[in-house]
Image (tube, rainbow, N blue to C red):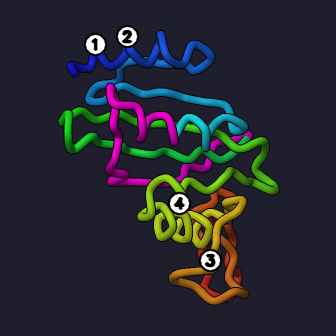
Amino acid sequence: MTNEELKAYLTERFPEAEIKTGPQYVEMTVVNSSLLETANQLKTEKETSFDYLFCLTGVDYPQNMGIIYHLESLEHRHTMVLKVKTADRVNPAVDTVSSVWVTAKYHEREVYDLLGVRFNNHTDLRRVFLDDDWGHPLRKDYVDEVRIVER
């Protein structure tokens, strides 16, 4: 599918989502409560068949945290970006998609470690790089008095 065809399909299939064509990918933003169901559908529907999660990252926005999933269909050779925002910045949380894409398990641990986003129902949510007593250094409000790191 071309980006235009993919956007048209996603718009019809997911009318509640915000869908736009970015500079490289079709971008779809969903509400937090529909993330897991949407992810399952994107992977299992034959028209999309997004079987490869090749990047998952977090973004610190002023009011909340965003999680961005880059997806590819190895069968159809099309790609897209799936986005979701947390309810707030203080206790950010979204459902894990590791039951859909196994590689999400490790990407989510990294986002948890560096931004403090909790992934509900994750089977092994623990830090990857830093000790438990560290803060979350990619947050815009991060301050570390000992190492003199400020943002």
User: Which residue position is annotated with label 4?
Assistant: 98
Is residue 113 shown in magenta? no
Which residue corresponds to mark 1?
Answer: 4
Is 33 placed left or right of 72 in the picture? right
112 w.r.t. 64: above or below: below
Which is more N-terminal, label 3 or label 4?
4
Looking at the rendered structure, which numbered label has been put on residue 8?
A: 2
With 97 as the anchor, is 136 left or right in this view?
right
Q: Secondary structure at mark 3?
A: loop
Residue 135, position in %: x, y? 69, 76
Measured in 3D between alpha carbons, the distance from the residue under mark 1 to the one under mark 2, in whole angstroms, is: 6 Å
Neighbour class for label 3 at 10 Å: few (<14), some, many (≥20)?
Answer: few
- Which quadrant is home to the N terminus? top left
Tell me what residue is drawn at x 68 percent, y 50 percent: 94
N-term mark: 4 or 2: 2
Quarter of the picture containing the C terminus is bottom right
Q: Quadrant of residue 61?
A: top right
Earlier-in-chain disc, 1 versus 3: 1
Local crowd size for mark 2, using a 10 Å CA cut-off: few (<14), some (14–19), many (≥20): some
Amino acid tagged 3: Asp
Q: Amino acid at mark 2?
A: Ala
Span of residues in magenta:
40-63
